[in-house]
Image (tube, rainbow, N blue to C red):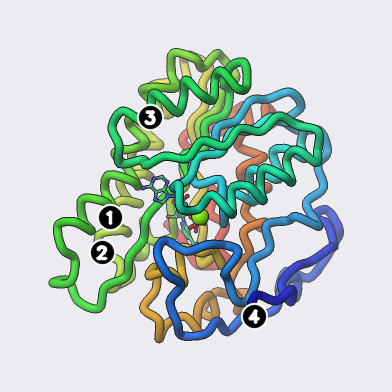
Amino acid sequence: MSDDTNTTTVDQLTLQDPVKRYPSITPPAEALPGTGLDAEMTPKADLGEKSYRGTGRLEGRKALITGGDSGIGAATAIAYAREGADVVITYLPEEEKDAKKVAAIIEAEGRTVGTVPGDLRDKAFAKTLVDEAVKTLGGLDILVNNGGKQVATESFDDIDDEQLEATYDINILAMFRLVRAALPHLEPGATIINTTSIQAYSPSATLIDYASTKAAINNFTKGLAEQLAPKGIRVNAVAPGPIWTPLQPSGGQLPDDLPEFGKSTALGRAGQPTELAPAYVFLASPESSYVIGETLNVNGGMPTP
Ligand code: NAD
Ligand code: MG
């Protein structure tokens, strides 16, 4: 069972020591089954359920978030709702339990929420998903491309074609398809935010396939940003460092590396998903009107180019 040692009730606007905002965790060296459920994490991750405080920064906005059931996407969905947005989340069907929890939190804010299970590898899903989101929300003005796959391998030879193709399909090809499906609905003022990674610049030896998709996402973000800026649509990326989400203990790290997860950052601890949410809020909000093609690093102090 999970514990509550990571859950803070102190909101993100209260002055606090970033070193001590969360404890330095030492997760067990054992893997979660499948793609991992937030509900099964030990220690528990903080999605901001009890702490994220909105200040009206996304009033009336309509957001679609992939991988919005858990981790960074769930923390972003909760923050968006508390900032006044209506939200549709999509996720793998087997992660329905997590999605329902996030949906209940959004509903409790009095916002509209849609839950759309599906597989980002399915070429037809992008259009079905966007159509469903537009129907639920009455339009679309924020697309967060966040769903992703990360599988650590001891050796290069362990990256088989199935893993290689699934990782590229989910992490980068799905972004092309989702943007293509979303564009006809996006008006000036709309924003697209892609989740990349510190791995885009500092690839781990155990994550060669994953890290190379993240480098592609950085490049994709900049090129797309240039193309869409004249239309009034801003594209940016967020590059997380080591964040405690189901992706990591479900094969994203080799089990023996889990107890050390996040300890090599300057803050000496892993980040919690809710610590990412303000970056996604900022890039979605009109206050970032002159920020285009940027990669906002949220990584506990790991040097980036
Ligand atoms: P997570 O497991 O909570 O979220 C990933 C989500 O992607 C899953 O919840 C799942 O719903 C979705 N997903 C996976 N495969 C899918 C598929 N085939 N079809 C549809 N949806 C699918 O983990 P997270 O860490 O919050 O991941 C979110 C993003 O953050 C990912 O792009 C990941 O690469 C990125 N990221 C994470 C970290 C980290 O340390 N956790 C660091 C850098 C980047
Ligand atoms: Mg999940």
Q: Secondary structure at mark 1?
A: helix
Which of the 4 quarters of the picture holds residue 178? Answer: top left
Q: Is residue 67 above or below residue 273?
A: above
Question: Which residue is tagged 2?
Answer: 208
Question: Which residue is tagged 1?
Answer: 212
* Residue 73 percent location from the top left of the image: 56, 48
Q: Pointer 4 and pointer 1: residues touching (CB < 8 Å)? A: no
Q: Secondary structure at mark 3?
A: helix
Residue 242 seen in the figure:
yes
Q: Is mark 4 within 8 Å of ligand 1?
A: no
Which of the 4 quarters of the picture holds residue 122? Answer: top left
Q: Pointer 1 and pointer 2: residues touching (CB < 8 Å)? A: yes
Q: Is residue 4 above or below residue 75?
A: below
Residue shown at 57%/54% (left/top)?
A: 70
- As measured in the structure, the alpha-carbon distance from the residue carrying label 2 to the one carrying label 4 is 27 Å
* Residue 212 percent location from the top left of the image: 27, 55
* Residue 24, label in figure: 4
Query: Where is the C terminus found, in terms of image quarters?
Result: bottom left
Left or right side of 222 for 12: right
Residue 72 seen in the figure:
no
Which of the 4 quarters of the picture holds residue 201? Answer: bottom left
Other-residue count near label 4 (Cα within 10 Å), few / some / many at <14 / 14–19 / ≥20:
some
* Residue 126, label in figure: 3
Which of the two residues, 178 or 117, is positioned nearer the viewer here? 117
